[in-house]
Amino acid sequence: MTHHTRPPSRICPNCDGFASVAVTLGGRDRHGLLRTITAHCPACHGTGTAHHPARAREGASA
């Protein structure tokens, strides 16, 4: 019996798979550490993958 595998997930075209990044705010806190925030890709919501496009049903009438 064969094992069914899932198709590989598509990489988000907007962020190229780098869905979350740390951005420095330009300065240091009182402990000397860089102040950073985390920014997520708005298209994939931080997952790095895109959904497969919906297939059109053949022979469907409107």
Image: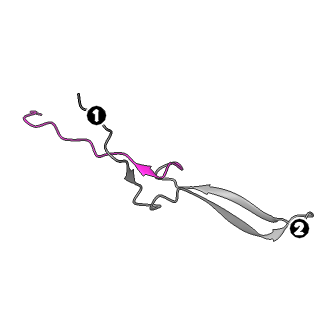
How would you rate the neighbour count of disc 1 (Cα within 10 Å): few for under 14, some for 14-19, many for 20 or more? few
2 sits left or right of 22 in the view: left
Residue 32, percent from left and from top: 88, 67
Residue located beneath label 2 in the image: 32
Say left or right for 60 vs 22.
left
Q: Is residue 1 above or below residue 28?
A: above
- Write down the region rendered in magenta: 45-62
Task: Name the foreground residue: 8 vs 15.
Answer: 8
Measured Cα–Cα span from mark 2 to mark 1: 52 Å
Exactly how many numbered labels are in the figure?
A: 2
Amino acid bearing label 2? Gly
Tag shown at residue 34? none
The residue at the point 81 percent across, 71 percent down is 27
Residue found at the very far top of the displayed protein: 1
Q: Secondary structure at mark 1?
A: loop
> Taking 59 as reference, is 7 above or below it?
below
Q: Tell me if 27 is positioned left or right of 14 in this view.
A: right
Label 2: how many Cα within 10 Å (few below 14, some 14–19, many 20+): few
**In the figure, 54 relative to 25: above or below?**
above
Q: Is the magenta region chiefly helix, strand or loop? A: loop
Q: Which residue is mark 1?
A: 4
